[in-house]
Image (cartoon, grey):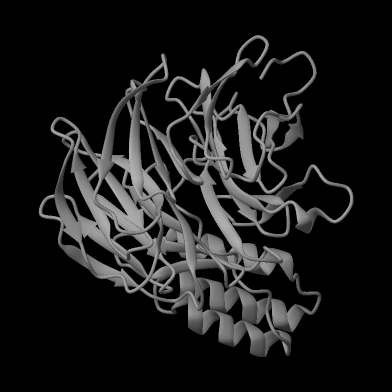
Amino acid sequence: PNSVFKEALDIIAKRPLDLDSAGRQRDVLLDRLHAGKLKLGDFLDLWKDVRGEEPAPPVPPPSPMPAKAAGSLPTTYRECDPLCGHGKLVWSVHFSPDGSLLASGSKDNTIRVWEMAGSGAHRTLQGHTDDVNCVRFSPDGTLLASGSDDCAIRLWRMPQGSPLQVLKGHTHWVRCLDFGPRNTLASGSGDSTVRIWNLDSGEEVKKLDGHSNTVFGLAFSPDQSVLVSASKDCSIRMWSTADWKTIRVLTGHTSDVNGVAFSPDGRLLASASDDKTVKLWDVDSGMVAYTISGPNDWAWSVAFRPDGLLLACGSDDGCVRMYNARTWALVQTLTAYLFRPSRHKIRSVAFRPDGSLLAAAGKDAKVRLWRVDAPAGVSA
């Protein structure tokens, strides 16, 4: 195929030949490859023999992301003033669908809802009696859900921030939430279960068993046909939202899997783990497409930029790393701490829906913000 032939040309371009005889052999190999008479793997082996050394490896297979369009956002960010108000570690951050609000949940038992325009004023939502581990806006922005170590899920009417209802059923801390199809909410817990709630009635409609330890991460696919759950048991489970049955179990991480995120087109799944890696999974096959070994400590949270061009990962070394979501090359490392950044562990990352802001939550009780680094004269 043309794509395979182009990949071979890219490899050769990285390692040009000076010898005429070797050059002729190269051309023969390319002709056979282009004619479909030679596979890329065989070409690489023969190319190694021609050069007498190890060839440059092929670039990682690109994700099915769109090519960068003219006028799209830059891929680097600069730090803004942090949001201060929480008294202890911040566990979770999430933007409203219109990007006007940012919610944060903290070990201080409170939720804060920050206005992203003007003065950055915030309101404090109180009701939980223990750590607030997760916050999540509904797709239409009218609800905010929060999960806590007090085993309860609370729903808040937005933008007023008024309490709406409390969902109870988990027997251990609630660690993750996501809104699903047919007006449902999924929750993951230290009781090793995923529970599905009907938001019209406030009733639990399904309990999903399968994990053998805490469920740390949840994500619905963009088309909401699949729910994935990540666990301390080192596995990721894929569930069909049609009948809530297991589709497949993804294994490959060697320690706790803390966070998961779908690419905007739903074809890739990113997972962050205590094994200090981020894995990219092909959703259709369930196979690992690529492994990023960049974090220097436990990887806690991953998020794709909404345009699909970047993947952000927050880790216990106090850094947020930004990766090109086509090549998986490191684009930028963000940290707000000049000294001992590992003391300020990053527990959650989230992009504003327009991609102009990145928020990160961590141990220093602040919500850190980075704004897209727009060229001079261009507003972000």
- Tell me if 267 is positioned left or right of 6 in this view: left
Q: Which residue is drawn at the image coordinates 80% and 53% (left, top)?
A: 341
Q: Nearer the viewer, residue 10 or 148?
A: 148
Left or right: residue 137 versus residue 255 is left
Count of numbered circles on the image = 0
Identify the residue at horizontal 33%, vertical 29% (top origin).
139
Vertical relation: 170 (above or below) 109: below
**Along the viewing direction, whichever of 376 and 131 lies nearer the viewer:** 131
Task: Name the quadrant containing residue 211.
Answer: bottom left
Instruction: Name the spot of residue 213 as percent of width and height, x first.
Output: 37, 71
Left or right: 240, with 279 as reference point? left
Q: Is residue 220 left or right of residue 71?
A: left
Task: Name the residue furthest left.
Answer: 243
Which residue occupies the extreme top position in the image? 118
The relative height of residue 65 versus residue 375 in the rendered view (above or below) is below
Farthest residue in the front direction? 129
The N terminus - image quarter: bottom left
Vertical comparison of 297 with 363: above or below: below
Q: Above or below — where is 228 with respect to 98?
A: below
The quarter in which the C terminus is drawn is top right
The picture places residue 325, in percent across and down from the top left corner, at 55, 50
Can you give x and y, in whole percent of width and height, for residue 313 in the image? 60, 52
Foreground pick, 278 / 61:
278
Q: Which residue of the protein is positioned furthest toward the right in this rendering?
A: 339
- Residue 154, image x, y percentages: 34, 35
Does residue 332 appear in this view?
A: yes
The picture quadrant where one finds residue 118 is top right
> Is residue 266 visible from the viewing direction of this image?
no
Residue depicted at 67% across the width and 86% down the height: 50
